[in-house]
Amino acid sequence: MLPDIRAQLQTHLRDILTRHYPPLADLSAFELETPADKKHGEYASNVALKATKVLKKPPMVLAQEFAGLLMASAAPTPLAGLIVNVEPKAPGFINFYLSPKAFFGILTDIFTQKDKYGTSSVGQKAKVQIEFVSANPTGPLSVAHARQAVVGDALGNIFEAIGFDVTKEYYINDEGRQIDLLGDSVKMRAEEILSGRSMQEHFSDDHYKGGYIKEMAAQCLKEVGIRTREELQAKRVEVRKFAVDYLMNVIQKELSDFGVNFDVWSYQSKIADEKHIQKMLEYLNGCHVLEEKDGAVWFKSTQFGDDKDRVVRKSDGSYTYLMPDIVYHEDKYKRGFQKVINFWGPDHHGYINRLKAAVQALGHDPASLIVLIVQLATIYREGQPVSMSTRSGQYIQLQEVMDEVGVDAARFFFLMRHINMHLDFDLDLAKKESPENPVYYIQYAHARINSMNQKAREAGLANQETNFQLLESPEELDLIKRLGSFSEILMICYNELDPYALATYLQELAGLFHKFYDGHRVVGEDRALSSERLALVNATKIVLANGLRLLGVSRPERM
RNA sequence: GUCCCUGUAGCUCAGAUGGAUAGAGCAUCAGCCUUCUAAGCUGAGGGCCGCACGUUCGAUUCGUGCCAGGGACGCCA
């Protein structure tokens, strides 16, 4: 891999300036930025502006002095042939203009690393757990889960690409009130089938009333082998278990159809059973962070920055959700994860502090627990929002969205906004095969390149993978430069804990490609130029493919 | 009342770590296919970056306070 020009230039800048101006050694302003406007060169430095106070001279004067020094001293370094000009510019910027040759290393890198291009080892194999979706098995997945599924999956892929040891995990809440309600709902529907009488008046607002409950009830009677109401009464537990297993099968199938695969499926009933909870309560009690009040047991989370203390065992002896969750999180740390990332819906926002408090009480760094809130998505059909209400059974399911717009468009649309932004998902737009649809825009670039390769084969033209010389137009250079920032983009995703930047990057990259395509003929008369351009588009194809793969979107060869 | 998110072009949104004339898509208007995929490209118009103050040589970006929209604040999960 070629040394990074920016880093080299930065070092050069620091060395030369601090040697001639010792007071600048304390200055931390040697980063080179990329100007928004190309006419300001490839890189720009603001040292002169920053140095004006220390050296007590006007910025523009300093910029001129600095530029002269840099130009003269670049000659003996490896940067010599690459820097074309160093120019001071008002109000005190120093702009660096580079020769096209400076960028050709990017193409060579891409061909050397192929599908590994962009990956790095910054994660140093640290163990990271990403827990996401974790929807209660009380019904098929909704679009809210779908967004979490895609974002969690893509972020996990990106973490892996930059060198973390990632475990994607789904936590199944197969116990508690919601599951009891589910069991009851199925049992009542089963009773309707056996007795022929409606149980409608027994259904409360909290019971599940979706159509799938009736289907499950019918199947449950068959598979569990229940023929009478007495048997049904006797087999409550089996009915409940049947319901959970049935729905987890549905959920797993949906997720795998959606291209989301988990490494670990963990069950609350196994990790946080009565025995583990008892042990945890004893342990916490030993740490003096529990308190009994009003017949309930409270976790004194205010000691760790929460706004109020939280009940962990209710006065009726049952546990709040926090209790098994504390046990589950201790289990995560026991398994050796150095970073624990949870994706939650916005309704759980208030829950973050108490869980962090618990993690801290258990002796872990609260910063190692990262909770990401993924905002909801509103689905629009024909310009109208499709309303959602979970319990009543009227809500848009992941399955419907997949059926209607396909996996690629669905995944990409969920990634098209920052995770902390509310997302409007327009079904009609996602279905459109038009330029408005960014998925096709990117995939189209990929497919176009494939067809150029076909043409090149017919012409007996080979890919030039090194020794570039002829690429020099703005369209070619813009494309190459953008290809070179792929790994930087992955780092932005990592820092922001959001795969969003990658989705945007791929759109930009596809745009630069399409511009290049329209302006320049690849397979043409000049064979030397043709094979360099062919290499350029194939490098583009590699980066597009690498990016799409991380997002879980397919890379069609033909469209 | 407390906390979180958001406020940028007519609409949907970019502008990570402060920089030079704030960008893209859609919509509107005008163009480009005898040559590698027109699911593409080119051009035009369109802006008190919610408001005020502060920090700074420099603020859409950072801080504080307002205003507006959305959401969360249970011995639910």
Image (cartoon, coloured by chain):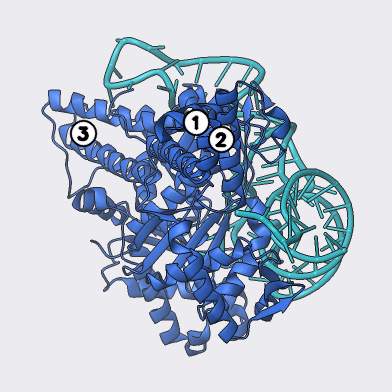
Chain colours: A blue, B cyan
Q: Is residue B2 left or right of residue A391?
A: right
Residue A504: image location, x then y, percent: 49, 44
Task: Specify the subunit that label 3 lies on.
Answer: A
Q: Are marks 3 and 2 in contact (CB under 8 Å)?
A: no
Callout 2 secondary element: helix
- Residue A530, which numbered label? 3
Q: Can residue A374 be seen at all in this image of the molecule?
A: yes
- Residue A186, which numbered label? 2
* Residue type beneath disc 1: Met
Q: Is residue A108 left or right of residue A484?
A: left
Label 3 to label 1, Cα distance in Å? 62 Å
Task: Specify the subunit that label 2 lies on.
Answer: A
Q: Are marks 1 and 2 in contact (CB under 8 Å)?
A: yes
Q: Nearer the viewer, residue A106 or A317?
A: A317
Closest to the camera, between mark 3 and mark 2, is 2
Residue at mark 1: A216
Figure quadrant of the N terminus of chain A: bottom left
Callout 1 secondary element: helix
- Residue A98, which numbered label? none
